[in-house]
Structures are given as C-alpha cells and as structure tokens.
Image: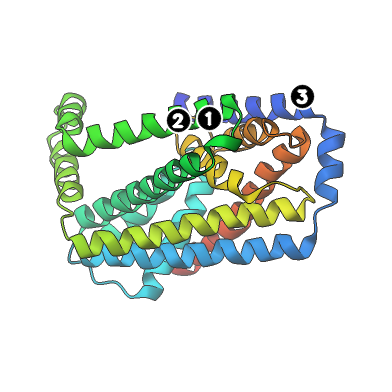
Amino acid sequence: MDKRVVARVLISAGLLALLIYRTGIVVIGETLAGVILLLFLLAVIVENMGVALSAKKWQMLLESRGIQLSYRESLSYYYIGSFFNTMMPSSVGGDIIKSYKLGKKTDSVGAFSSSIMDRMMGLLAVVSIASVAVVISYGILPRAALLAAVAVISGFAGTVVILMKTSLVERFTTLVFSRWATIHAFLMKVISSVKGYRDKKLILAAMVISFLYHIMLILNNYLLSLALGMNIDIRYFFIFIPIAEILVSLPVSIQGFGVREGSYALLFSSIGAEYAAAFSLGFLDQIVKVITSMIGGVVYVIKK
C-alpha cells in the first residue's frame, strides 16, 4: 500500500480516536441514539438533490469543452464519482475516476478539466458564502472562531488567485513530470483547458448552481442539528460549514473522516454547543454522504 495512503488512514483513524476519547464514546452513542429519524432521512434526500444539481453544472462545463452528455449520463457519472470519493484515500479520487471513465469514451482533456473547474467553482462558492457570513455576523463570533475563519478564507482565496493568475502550476508540472513526456503533455493540456474557461454566461450559470448547492449543504447541516436536538443560530452554519468544507478538501485524510468531526467539534463548541453534539453532527453528516455515495456504487456495478 502507498505510504501516503497509509498516512491518511492513520491520520483519519488517529483524529477520530482522539476525538472519541476526548468526548466519550458513551456520550456520543447517547447523542446519536436520540436522532430524529424523519429529519435524518430528509437530510439524505436533500443530499441526493445536491448531487442532482451538481451533475447539471458538470454537464454544462462538459458541453463547453465539446463533450455532449445527456443529463442522465452526467448524473450517473457524478454518482460514481461520489462513490469513489468516499472509498478512495483522497477527497478528489472520485473526480479522477469519473473523468478517466468518461475520457475513455470522449475527450479525456475536456473530461478532466471540467471536473477540476467544477471542484474549483464549488470551493470558490464556499469561500464567498463564508466571507459574506463573517462580515454579516462579525459581532456574534468568538475571537478564536473569527480568526480561524479569516485565516482559512484568506489562505484559500490567495491560493486560487496564485493558481489561476500565474504560471506556478505550469512550472510545477514541468518540474515534476518533465521526465514523462506523455503525462507532462497531457497535464499541460488540462491546465490550459481549465484556464480557457472564459464564457461569462457559462461561468455565471455554473457559479449560481455552485452557490445553490452549498447553501443546500449548509441548510442540510442545520437540519441534522435539529435531528440531534441542537439549538444553534442558523447564521453560524453559514460560517462554520464552509470552513469545515475547505478543511475537508485538503488531501490529509480519508474522505475527511476525523477532519470534519474535529472541525465541527472545535467550531461549534466555541459558541457554546456541547462537544459531543458538535462531534456527532459532523459524524452524522459523514454518514449522510456515505449513504448517498452507495447509490454511486450501485450505478458503477450496473454500468460496469
């Protein structure tokens, strides 16, 4: 097994073990046992609606690269991607799999570049929502939570600007892959394709969908908090959930396990929520995502 995979497994397992030890497995069990099942099932439905919405955005991005794909096909590939995002040791593993499978039938450069653009637009929407929420809710945030929010938002925004407006990615790609001419040439084409998204109407429409999806994701977490009997001002969700999503997107754990629960516990406990409930909220959100991804597993078997 790859050393990086082992490291991510250990990080996820270690973080979860530490959080469970600190919180108490009995307390966590009692908290999860009290979940309102109807609200939990509703959250699963909303999560699937989010996948359906995202599949439409990806279809639009594919069409702009000359890849004609029906919405049904786009949705099936998107579910497959969500399945492998859960099963593989990276938050982008599913993006690679769905792009590779589609690329074998169409244009591989367009398949990969559209997936990268899809992911970047999602993260940009997350940062934008968090930024607006921080400004609006500045007065109610504890100092520690405010500093964490500003640090994460600024760091990510700066990274996006550097990646899109400089040749740093190209130089890094050449440095690492120049020895493998075929791989290097392919990656340079993908990078060029990503930076070639200039259609303002397309970008605006795709960003609107990204915003709608992440607002749904935030409201879904609020729904799960109600399922756990938590009483938290909804404004905090528009700040904390985007921050957690940015942290989860970092390739340091398996599907964000440990990172999501830890960030939820730290952020929500900073405003007075019980640590066990905050941890359980993050864990419950992971379970919703895993259940949804199982649909992708079924689709993958059928298409295979």
User: Local crowd at mark 1 within 10 Å, few (<14), some, or many (≥20)?
Assistant: some
Q: Can you give x and y, in whole percent of width and height, for residue 182 in the image? A: 14, 40
User: Local crowd at mark 3 within 10 Å, few (<14), some, or many (≥20)?
Assistant: few
Badge 2 or badge 3: first in the primary sequence: 3
Badge 1 or badge 3: first in the primary sequence: 3
Q: Nearer the viewer, residue 150 or 184?
A: 150
- Identify the amino acid type marked 3: Arg
Q: Nearer the viewer, residue 113 or 144?
A: 144
Number of disc labels: 3
Is 176 left or right of 36, judged from the image as shown? left
Residue at image position (60%, 33%) is 263
Give the SS element for disc 3.
Answer: helix
The quadrant where residue 156 appears:
top left
Give the SS element for disc 1.
Answer: helix
Quadrant that contains the C terminus: bottom left
303 to 128, vertically: above or below: below
Residue under label 2, please give it: 150
Task: Return the mark for residue 146.
Answer: 1
The answer to whether the residues at label 1 and label 3 have Cβ atoms under 8 Å apart is no
Q: CA distance from mark 1 to mark 3?
A: 24 Å
Give the SS element for disc 2.
Answer: helix
